[in-house]
């Protein structure tokens, strides 16, 4: 069993995709993360949903989530509107996480070791000729591993 | 909208649950993480799937996932058997992550701030009288936020 046998499609976003569109993808597809494609069409990093939320949360509340209690319920309900026309690029931390990536021939052990060491539920599979061919998710990997 | 309106059930495990059983829960239910219940029946921490995998990966490969390539495909396919009769407790890092927890009255802004600051897609909701009443997942939160 190799990475190519476990590949699934995943929604991707570009650096200039609106952050609100990324939020909608999380709501609709519930992916473990969104693969961000750079200006050259190459996978750059994985955007976790928590970081899309972060961009909508005022800085003083990011520093101390308990301060969210000073905001009334009605205002809290619509806080994501603060995303406005901000982009995926603005959601990314300054030093974004290195992409967990394997070739199509990677074994399940290599995939598991990479997920474990990089604490990610999503590994990007890149073919040297074809470029990114999809991802392997933790759910897919676990599914096949418990069958074996 | 408050945490109590967004609560969903989630599979839980105990410290003495077999790690293989935890792996099966990840395969079957695809949760963002498993809530670990301590000996007193209280939620202790959240176990990410990547850490269940870690327990099955030999230490020398954890340190350098590229070394997984020296293991042949047939052996790699069944590596999770190495979990044997090990338990969830053994999957947890020595210093486990602090639990992201709110009361039933927390607003969506408080939930979002907590997910963002603790980089977790799962917040446990604890009622002072009833104890843990469920979790709010990032997917549920996003779903309701993009509707607002």
Image (cartoon, coloured by chain):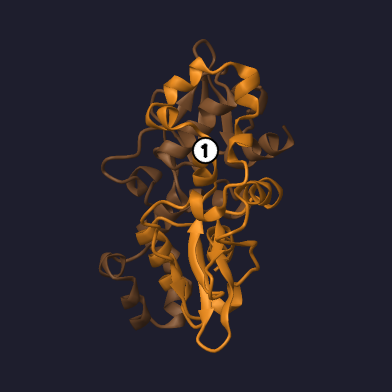
Chain colours: A orange, B brown
Q: Residue at x 74, y 36 (%)?
A: B147
Query: Can residue A109 be seen by looking at this rendering?
Result: yes
Q: Is residue A111 left or right of residue A81?
A: left
Image location (x, y in percent) of residue A24: 68, 47
Q: Residue at x 36, y 33 (%)?
A: B98
Give above or below for B83 relative to B109: below
Q: Tag 1's secondary structure?
A: strand
* Quadrant location, the C terminus of chain B: top right
Q: Is residue A18 left or right of residue B20?
A: right
Would you name the residue on which mark 1 appears?
B122
Q: Residue at x 46, y 81 (%)?
A: B73
Q: Residue at x 31, y 77 (%)?
A: B67
| Of residues B83 and B123, the one drawn nearer to the viewer in this rendering | B123
Q: Is residue A36 left or right of residue B79?
A: right
Q: Report the number of discs.
A: 1
* Quadrant location, the N terminus of chain B: top right
Give above or below for B123 relative to A69: below
> Tag 1, which chain?
B
Image location (x, y in percent) of residue A69: 50, 17
| Of residues A13 and A142, the one drawn nearer to the viewer in this rendering | A13
**Looking at this rendering, what residue extends furthest in the right direction?**
B147
**Looking at this rendering, what residue extends furthest in the top direction?**
B129
């Amino acid at each position: 069993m190799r990475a190519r046998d476990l590949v699934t499609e995943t929604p991707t976003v570009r650096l200039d995709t609106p952050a609100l569109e990324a939020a909608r993808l999380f709501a609709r597809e519930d992916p473990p993360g969104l693969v961000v494609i750079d200006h050259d069409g190459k996978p750059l990093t994985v955007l976790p949903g928590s970081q899309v939320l972060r961009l909508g949360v005022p800085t003083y509340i990011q520093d101390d989530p308990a301060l969210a209690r000073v905001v009334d319920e009605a205002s809290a309900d619509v806080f994501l509107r603060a995303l406005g026309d901000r982009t995926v690029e603005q959601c990314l931390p300054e030093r974004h996480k290195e992409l967990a990536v394997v070739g199509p021939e990677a074994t399940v052990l290599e995939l598991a070791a990479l997920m474990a060491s990089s604490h990610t539920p999503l590994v990007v599979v890149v073919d040297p000729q074809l470029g990114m061919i999809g991802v392997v998710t933790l759910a897919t990997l676990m599914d096949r591993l418990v069958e074996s």
